Image (tube, grey):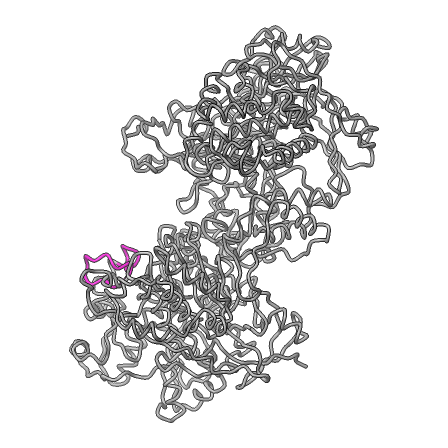
């Protein structure tokens, strides 16, 4: 038995605080956490107060213990979350992370307090392949892409966090272009990116052109036409043209992952496109 | 693993350096029948822990890490090149541009006043400013890295001594209030002689442990209330007991990554009494049942590392490490691993990751090291001083004795031993008193707190204010610009943050910026307080959690800024 | 197998199995998302063996790789079996309980000593022994294969040889242990399940079974032949023999995908009438008298497909088909009506519901359930059934339910296309990660690292033949020759070369391959061609 926000809750032994709270119907905000990936505990947005603990605990990775008394909201928790959001909003372009911007507003984050002259993540947009774009000025270093490229899904290990501190950045070895790296262009990193720092080229181009409009889009679940594994595809269509393909995270066959053929091999549907 | 290897080949020197370091660590390629069988997958990737030694081998051999060199190291160890690069770029000591040599000049809180002048005198040489090099008692300090495996510590450093490359001799001034327990042999035994060490009572603790059994040792250490001397003050006996009770393979780690600014106590122990460190680890191994030990020494302690390696070899040759330690019916051996310029790796879980060949980022706790530590195994991790303390306690010495490195504006900077409960004033007096009027005293290093001259009667102990931390005491006189000192501390945390968690990655840089605005008359107290709160409450590890301590105490004591609210 | 043409296990089982044996499969590239499940298994501690002539990206993940000679799979399987039996590691209780024919089988593998196995397969005896022991001793083991097993003229025997190993050790019919052929196309499993096999009606119903056939006849109101039809290779023989004069091809590109391509194209050209229905123009539509533009099955129409774990899932219309392209069902109904029948317009769901009324495997799979559950695995006999994660649990039941599983004595026969001084190099074929079959679909999409058509040779052969990366080489088999740029690959050994079929417009590899097919399955010997390679020009 544990207590969450004053309510007694039964939680399985190996449940995380996040899971226990969700079971009780309490939503704890997250950023770096994704169900299909190992929790990185990096963003600290999901911190909660555990009675008797010296510091706040990350809800995504801390397992509940018998008798734990947890507060998912408190002045201390809210201050930490507000600050995390302020720190992110003051340093990274969150324009393609509407949920974070909403949270920032909800928690009263005021990133402008850090002044005009402040360090920000400013990196050139990397367009070095025809399939996806890296716009690392939008990167919050949530480690999701690294996990998806690595041990949690693809096991290709084309990218890593490199350097340290505020200068830490997602990179290939020696910063080589993606086509010269180990990247196999599965796009599983793109699929897990929460801020649009990784974005498929079709979406990037349409956003640049001002034609990307999710209100006009339909998303249809179907099955990939390549090989016999049976990967679920979510086909995003705008004006009767496929604009993007993703895979559902909650389906056991793919867990959100695809290969280059499934995610990017749909040009035969939208009519002839020039390869490369 | 289907890795895409770097196609640039290594140079011959790089190849030889890698091949040699891997062979020295007993790593042989598992090749099958060409074209017919091969070992692959995880079975080919079992020695990731040799990545950091391999990176050192490259950097030591040729002065930098090239694409071909890193690629070859990764290929040999079945490490993805991107990950190898991510690990290599984590550390300050590695260069990714070709260079002949580099002189690292400390510009931290003690050496800072001398740094500009020293650097100006080194015109034409590649110089990097570096945080505390751990020889504060002989400020200023420099560290030279040259190709061909040459690493030299220079203290005190002058342009001339740097150019001559004259290494430092071990003559740290020591002083004792009360009985010498931890420093009993320092300066009086030959650190290169096992016989000397034995003649001075060395290895009697291990003998006694073998006679009385592990439980007796545990009980004695528990009764002596030995607490961790790395800064966290965790009861040593509790760690040992937890690991002793765990099943399966276990590990003892000696944390010798002493990097807290103003701190040089572990260095002195390793340089002057290395066998005591080994005996301490061996004692921990005997009590816990661990067969493998790692000593992780910071990369700037070249002499201490040398002394430890030599002592380990001597102990091994004498049967005090190996398959049957001291004929006591248990196996234990120690490997030395060298850090590469990253304060964060003194955090115990970062240290594990660093040894394992991962980026030195901290892990969540729980699980604690005693549950899942190095290589996922139950691990005792103790500071050098703690382990030497355990040896002394086993011989019925006072477990309350503590080391205090004292530097700055003090007449006899050096390493002092005194019983816990000693006052700051008494320590300063023992060190010959301040060189001039005291403005402030920093206790516990960059992660510690300032004291004003009126508050020096306060006593130092585990769990009291100000926090004991590493025990470092730095005295600042009234001529010191405290804004510069506090700024240096804030920049230290900004530079040493690993970058994993948002509060520390962004918060430490915002703290530096806010201090700058404060210096320009800005009203920043609320912002600094908010930053301190999120750092303390929400950072993953101790680095971030303590990154605002000194700044906050300086603000509270109006050493800087004054109260803007 | 054992009366049900489908893999026995679910993908999730490989995540917790103890031993993975990947045989003749480059799943890392050909089935990348299945390989994710396999990698989870490795991460969870499974040991992996991989058997492949090439050191592929898949085999790089194996703890142990066995570099077999092309076409010696039966020899290897029989050697493994003999070693298991000789060491007493076979599962005697399971064999007695659930199988027949063991004594004959044991006698048939008796000559396959480790030394004999090494002689024929090229794999060191100790490595074969390791694999045999590991497989026999594993608590659970998954044996997986792909076209490296089936694109041989001994395809069916190759599969039987693997099934024998599972029967010998009891690695089938239990959660975690099984036999899994990975399907190369998104509905090759479903196509077979729907009766697109010469000897089957939907739901695995044998055409020769009078009772079963009668149910279909009653529902469809027609009389059905009790004799099997032709499989693909037989059709081409029939075209050559003049017995088949009209061909209606739906969604295939045999002009480029058939072995001995020149011969295949000649056959298609000789037809009186060729109708081709496809989503884009292909080399085959160019030979057609009539082309029916079809909607893209996975994105422009409704229906179901079935995956390698027997999971039936819905495909849905995401975009409207372009121009005159129509849904396959519409085209078929229109065809029927133009041929004088009176078929009403039919939805995919109506067709499916009829199938459910006839196939017990699918009876419980309503569209509603498929939607709600993210697909269902057959057999799923009624609407309360959760679907079947694995098959043949009956083999372990007490008493064993249904017929016993037979061992099949299989003899190793070497590849037909013999290596000689004139054709000294063994050419084998396979896939690249970023391309698919003849490239009809994949070729239109970008792939930054697409390698293109090459003749891949080993560093040793490159040296003998004085060839380097990028040189143009002429590759000649007994049937024809092509020119391709050389790529030197360390994953190949002396005497072994590799090409893919993805770029027939650049290099028509099937000019080289042999159309000798397996009488049981109709698969041709794509994997084993004897060639010589020389600098072109």
Is A8 above or below relative to B561? below
Please provide the residue range marked out in magenta. Answer: C370-390
Above or below residue A169? Residue B214 is above
Residue at coordinates 67% horizontally, 34% vertically from top-left?
Answer: B310
Query: Can you tell which quarter of the image residue A57 is in?
Result: top left
Identify the residue shown where x is 67% and y is 50%. B69
* Residue in the picture at 49% in, 62% down: C65
Foreground residue among B105 and A250: B105
Which secondary structure class fits the magenta region best?
loop
- Up the image or down, C150 lies above or below A200; here it is below
Magenta residue check for C378: yes
Residue B40 x/y as whole percent: 52, 57
Q: Quadrant of the C terminus of chain A?
A: bottom right
- Does A132 sit left or right of C96 as displayed? right
Is C101 one of the magenta-colored residues?
no
In the rendered picture of this protein, how many numbered marks are placed on residues?
Answer: 0
Q: Is residue A245 above or below residue B60?
A: below
Percent x, y of residue C82: 39, 69
Image quadrant for the N terminus of chain A?
A: top left
Looking at the picture, tell me which residue is in the foreground, A51 or C522.
C522
Q: Where's residue C278, x and y in %?
A: 40, 75
């Amino acid at each position: 038995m544990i207590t969450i926000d004053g309510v007694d809750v039964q939680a399985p032994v190996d449940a995380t605080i996040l899971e226990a709270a969700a079971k009780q119907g309490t939503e704890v905000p997250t950023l770096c956490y994704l169900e299909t990936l190992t929790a990185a505990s990096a963003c600290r947005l999901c911190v909660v107060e555990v009675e008797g603990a010296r510091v706040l605990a990350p809800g995504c990775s801390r397992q509940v213990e018998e008798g734990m008394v947890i507060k998912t909201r408190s002045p201390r928790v809210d201050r930490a979350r507000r600050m995390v959001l302020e720190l992110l909003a003051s340093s990274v372009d969150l324009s393609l992370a509407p949920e974070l911007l909403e949270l920032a507003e909800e928690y009263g984050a005021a990133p402008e307090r850090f002044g005009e002259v402040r360090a920000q993540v400013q990196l050139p947009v990397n367009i070095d392949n025809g399939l996806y774009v890296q716009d690392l000025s939008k990167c919050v270093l949530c480690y999701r892409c690294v996990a998806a490229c690595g041990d949690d899904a693809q096991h290709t290990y084309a990218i890593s966090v490199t350097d340290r501190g505020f200068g830490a950045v997602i990179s290939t070895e020696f910063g080589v272009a993606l086509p010269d790296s180990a990247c196999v262009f599965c796009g599983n990193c793109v699929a897990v990116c929460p801020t649009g720092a990784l974005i498929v080229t079709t979406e990037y181009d349409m956003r640049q052109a001002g034609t990307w409009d999710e209100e006009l889009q339909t998303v249809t679940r179907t099955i990939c036409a390549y090989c016999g594994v049976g990967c679920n595809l979510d086909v995003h269509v705008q004006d009767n043209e496929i604009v993007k393909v993703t895979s559902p995270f909650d389906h056991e066959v793919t867990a959100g992952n695809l290969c280059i053929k499934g995610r990017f091999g749909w040009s035969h549907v939208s009519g002839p496109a020039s390869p490369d | 693993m289907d890795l895409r290897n770097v196609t640039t080949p290594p140079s011959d020197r790089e190849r030889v350096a890698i091949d040699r370091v891997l062979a020295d660590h007993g790593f042989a390629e598992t090749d099958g029948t060409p074209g017919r069988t091969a070992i692959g997958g995880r079975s080919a990737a079992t020695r990731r822990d040799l990545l950091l030694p391999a990176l050192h081998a490259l950097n030591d051999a040729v002065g930098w890490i090239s694409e071909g060199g890193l690629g070859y190291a990764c290929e040999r160890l079945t490490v993805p090149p991107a990950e190898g690069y991510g690990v290599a770029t984590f550390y300050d000591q590695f260069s990714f541009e070709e260079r002949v040599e580099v002189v690292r000049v400390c510009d931290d809180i003690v050496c800072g006043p001398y740094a500009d002048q020293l650097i100006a005198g080194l015109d034409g040489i590649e110089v990097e400013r570096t945080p505390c090099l751990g020889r504060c008692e002989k400020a200023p300090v420099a560290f030279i890295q040259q190709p061909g495996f040459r690493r030299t510590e220079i203290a005190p450093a002058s342009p001339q001594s740097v150019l001559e490359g004259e290494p430092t001799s071990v003559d740290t001034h020591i002083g004792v209030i009360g009985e010498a327990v931890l420093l009993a042999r320092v300066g009086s035994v030959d650190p290169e002689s096992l016989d000397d060490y034995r003649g001075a009572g060395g290895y009697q603790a291990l003998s006694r442990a073998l006679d009385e059994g592990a439980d007796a040792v545990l009980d004695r250490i528990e009764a002596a209330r030995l607490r961790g001397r790395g800064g966290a003050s965790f009861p040593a006996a509790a760690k040992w007991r937890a690991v002793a009770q765990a099943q399966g393979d276990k590990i003892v780690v000696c944390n010798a990554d002493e990097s807290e600014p103003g701190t040089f106590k572990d260095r002195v122990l390793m340089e002057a009494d290395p066998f005591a460190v080994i005996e301490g680890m061996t004692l921990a191994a005997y009590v816990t049942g661990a067969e493998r030990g790692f000593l992780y020494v910071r990369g700037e302690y070249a002499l201490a590392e040398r002394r430890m390696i030599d002592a380990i070899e001597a102990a091994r040759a004498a049967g005090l490490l190996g398959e049957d330690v001291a004929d006591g019916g248990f196996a234990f051996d120690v490997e030395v691993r060298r850090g590469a310029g990253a304060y964060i790796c003194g955090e115990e879980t970062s240290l594990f990751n660093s040894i394992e060949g991962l980026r030195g980022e901290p892990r969540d706790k729980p699980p604690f090291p005693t549950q899942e530590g190095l290589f996922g195994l139950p691990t005792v991790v103790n500071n050098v001083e703690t382990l030497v303390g355990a040896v002394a306690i086993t011989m019925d010495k006072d477990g309350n004795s503590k080391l205090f490195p004292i530097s700055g504006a003090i007449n006899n900077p050096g390493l002092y031993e005194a019983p816990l409960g000693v006052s700051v004033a008494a320590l300063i007096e023992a060190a010959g008193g301040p060189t001039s009027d005291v403005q402030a005293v920093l206790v516990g290093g960059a992660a510690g707190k300032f004291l004003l001259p009126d508050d020096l009667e306060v006593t130092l102990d585990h769990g009291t204010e100000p926090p004991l931390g590493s025990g470092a005491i730095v005295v600042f006189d009234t001529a010191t610009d405290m804004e510069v000192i506090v700024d240096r501390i804030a920049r230290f945390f900004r530079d040493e943050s690993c970058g994993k968690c948002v509060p520390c990655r962004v918060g430490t840089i915002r703290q530096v910026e806010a201090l700058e605005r404060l210096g320009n008359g800005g009203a920043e107290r609320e912002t600094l307080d908010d930053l301190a709160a999120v750092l303390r409450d929400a950072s993953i590890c101790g680095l971030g959690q303590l990154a605002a301590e000194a700044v906050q105490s300086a603000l509270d004591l109006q050493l800087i800024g004054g109260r803007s609210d | 197998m054992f009366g049900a043409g489908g893999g026995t296990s679910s993908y999730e089982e490989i995540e917790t199995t103890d031993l993975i044996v990947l045989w003749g499969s480059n799943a890392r590239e050909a089935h990348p998302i299945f390989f994710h499940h396999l990698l989870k298994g490795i991460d969870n501690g499974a040991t992996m063996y991989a058997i492949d002539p090439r050191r592929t990206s898949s085999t790089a993940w194996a703890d142990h790789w066995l570099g077999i000679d092309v076409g010696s799979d039966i020899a290897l399987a029989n050697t493994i079996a003999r070693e298991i039996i000789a060491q007493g590691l076979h599962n005697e209780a399971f064999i007695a309980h659930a199988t027949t024919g063991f004594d004959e089988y044991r006698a048939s593998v008796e000559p396959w000593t480790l030394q004999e196995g090494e002689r024929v397969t090229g794999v060191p005896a100790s490595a074969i022994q390791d694999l045999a022991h590991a497989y026999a001793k594993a608590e659970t083991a998954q044996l997986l294969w792909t076209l490296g097993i089936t694109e041989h003229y001994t395809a069916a025997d190759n599969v039987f040889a693997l099934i024998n190993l599972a029967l010998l050790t009891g690695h089938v019919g239990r959660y975690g242990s099984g036999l899994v052929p990975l399907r190369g196309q998104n509905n090759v499993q479903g196509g077979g399940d729907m009766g697109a096999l010469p000897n089957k009606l939907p739901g695995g119903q044998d055409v020769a079974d009078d009772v079963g056939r009668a149910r279909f006849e009653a529902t469809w109101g027609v009389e059905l032949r009790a004799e099997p039809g032709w499989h693909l290779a037989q059709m081409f023989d029939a075209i050559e023999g003049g017995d088949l004069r009209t061909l209606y091809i739906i969604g295939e590109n045999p002009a480029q995908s058939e072995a001995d391509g020149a011969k295949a194209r000649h056959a298609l050209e000789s037809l009186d009438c060729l109708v081709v229905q496809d989503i884009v123009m292909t080399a085959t539509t160019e030979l057609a008298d009539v082309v029916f533009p079809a909607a893209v099955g996975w994105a422009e129409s409704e229906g179901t497909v079935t995956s390698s774990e027997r999971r039936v899932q819905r495909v849905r219309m995401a975009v409207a088909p372009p121009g005159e392209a129509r849904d396959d069902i519409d085209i078929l109904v229109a065809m029927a009506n133009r041929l004088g029948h009176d078929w009403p317009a039919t939805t995919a769901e109506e067709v499916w519901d009829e199938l459910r009324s006839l196939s017990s495997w699918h009876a419980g799979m309503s569209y509603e359930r498929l939607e709600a559950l993210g697909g269902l695995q057959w057999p799923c006999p009624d609407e309360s059934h959760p679907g079947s994660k694995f098959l043949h649990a009956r083999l372990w039941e007490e008493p064993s339910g249904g017929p016993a599983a037979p061992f099949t004595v299989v003899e190793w026969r070497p590849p037909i296309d013999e290596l000689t001084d004139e054709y000294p190099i063994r050419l084998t074929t396979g896939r690249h990660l970023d391309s698919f079959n003849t490239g009809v679909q994949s070729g239109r999409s970008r792939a930054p690292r697409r390698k293109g058509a090459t003749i891949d040779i080993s560093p040793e052969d490159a040296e003998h033949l004085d060839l380097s990366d990028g040189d143009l080489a002429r590759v000649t088999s007994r049937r024809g020759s092509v020119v391709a740029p050389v790529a030197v690959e360390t994953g190949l050994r002396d005497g072994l070369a590799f090409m893919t079929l993805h770029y027939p417009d650049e290099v028509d590899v099937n000019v080289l391959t042999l159309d000798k097919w397996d009488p049981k399955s109709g698969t041709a010997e794509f994997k084993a061609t004897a060639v010589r390679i020389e600098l072109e020009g």
